[in-house]
Amino acid sequence: MNQETTNYLRMFATSRRQFLKASVIASGMTTTAAFAPAAVAGFSLGQAAAQEGDLGVLNFALTLEHFEARLYEVLTGEGTLLSGQALEYGQYYGSQEAMHVSLLTDAISAAGGDPVMAQDEYMFPTFANQQEVLEGVAAVEDVGASAYLGAAPLIQEADYLTVAVQIHSSEAYHATGIRLLAYGTEGAFPDFKNRAFADPRTAEEVTKIVAEFGVMAGMPDTGAGGLATKSRGANVFGVAGLGAVAAAGVGIAHSRAAREARQR
Amino acid sequence: MTFTQNRADTMEQAGHSRRTFIKGAAATGLMAIVAGSTSPSADAASFAKANLQDLTDADILNFALLLEHLEAEFYKGAVDSGVLTDYSVGIITELRDNEVIHVDFLTKALMDAGMAEEDLSSAEDINTDAFDYSSEAAILEVSEVLEETGVGAYTGAAALLDSKDLLAVAGSIEQVEARHHGAIRWLNDKNPSPDRENALGIVLTIPEVQERAKPFLNS
């Protein structure tokens, strides 16, 4: 496990003690995995050796999912400003975020980790009308999608990675639906730095954005300039970055020999 | 006969080359492997990995490039067809522009990585005669299939890529495909977010993608 993922877990495990507990269980599972239930919530534990760093990444994702699920619940609940299709979409997307919460909670528990809980309360912004709600939610969904995109390269276990990318799709669908309601077809897509490539965000960047909503309250300090949480994706984006990847052909193993050499 | 031997033999018989394999001309052998698999795991990623572990990152990206050519060619023709109304022409034009950028990006990346030009997926692999531009509805119907296939293909490919940098790139393109898919669903009077188990996006294996793309590829 590399330093990045270690730091990830340290950041998002709820305490040092639990971090240690999770790693012990995780290492134990490498040998006992064969006796674990074949599949829990779509994860096949037979192969998932519960990488410690992965649990940290999944817990970070779960932290955001709790917030999103609660946001939709509040915005579509008593005194809602939404009506018609906007209300329908809000309820539906809220139910899908709740599914993500359940899935991640079960997966983390099944791997011997300690799933984070929702905050007792969040500091939701005050909205005056439906349009403001839609614009706010669209921004949250865009951040959610960028968070999964930034986190994906940090995930070691293939099954977790695939599920994370699948949730990433779901967040992109939500963002698109809400953006269409808020801005119509002309604003269906965000203005990425390079229009055909979605921008990732590091955990640090995401944390800064959502902190004002109380999403990270009680979580370990993730203070700026602290732990190394930059995703590798961040380095290859931006117009210049993409060009550099293309120019250098970074990491493309063209021949099997090259691939084998790299794996040694 | 072991799995690996079986596959190697089949491919040798089929006169396997990178390009024909990617296009699915050698998919017969691949499908036989799929059909004969003793444990068709529900987990598509593990399944694909177990079956296709010899694919290099370049092979996988070249396959992605083929799909990008398919989308780009389809949308180019759609925009030029004169059939689209104000209802969809804005979205379809943006999709065309995005897919052309994906084509250019992947082509350059693969060429710089040393892939021979004759091995690269190209626009000539696409059977443009198979495209139905008879109506706006017909175009939107095909668009939805192509975008969903793109989402599933990139999602399935994520766990197959060795390079984490390339995974970041594939994920970035995948999100754009998902946004395209959502927008097309909206134009087809559907909720942009599909109603799927656990609210997870689609994931497809390479053989599944090949099956979907087959009608639009030259043999």
Image (cartoon, helix red, strand yellow):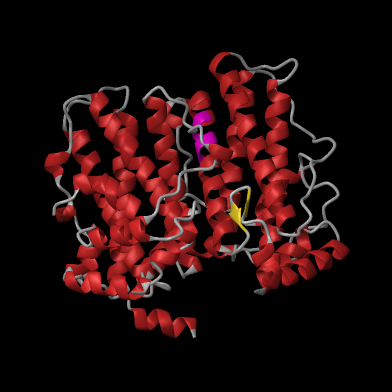
Viewer can see residue A82: yes
Q: Residue placed farthest to the left in the image?
A: B129
For the stretch drawn in magenta, what is the main secondary structure?
helix
On the rendered structure, is B177 left or right of B129?
right
Examine the rendered structure and indicate whether residue A74 appears above or below residue B172: above
Examine the rendered structure and indicate whether residue A68 appears above or below residue A73: below
Task: Please give the range of residues in magenta.
Answer: A172-177
Image spot of residue A171 (x, y percent): 55, 41
Image spot of residue B166 (x, y percent): 44, 65
In this rendered view, identify the residue nearer to me: A32 or B131. A32
Q: Quadrant of residue A36?
A: bottom right
Image spot of residue B132 (x, y percent): 18, 33
On the rendered structure, is A113 left or right of B108?
right
Examine the rendered structure and indicate whether residue A53 appears above or below residue B211: below
On the rendered structure, is B8 left or right of B15?
right
Viewer can see residue A237: no
Image spot of residue B78 (x, y percent): 21, 34
Which quarter shows the N terminus of chain A? bottom right
In this rendered view, identify the residue nearer to me: A98 or A221. A98
- Residue A174: say if magenta: yes
The residue under the point 16% across, 71% down is: B15
Q: Residue placed farthest to the right in the image?
A: A17
- Residue A122: say if magenta: no
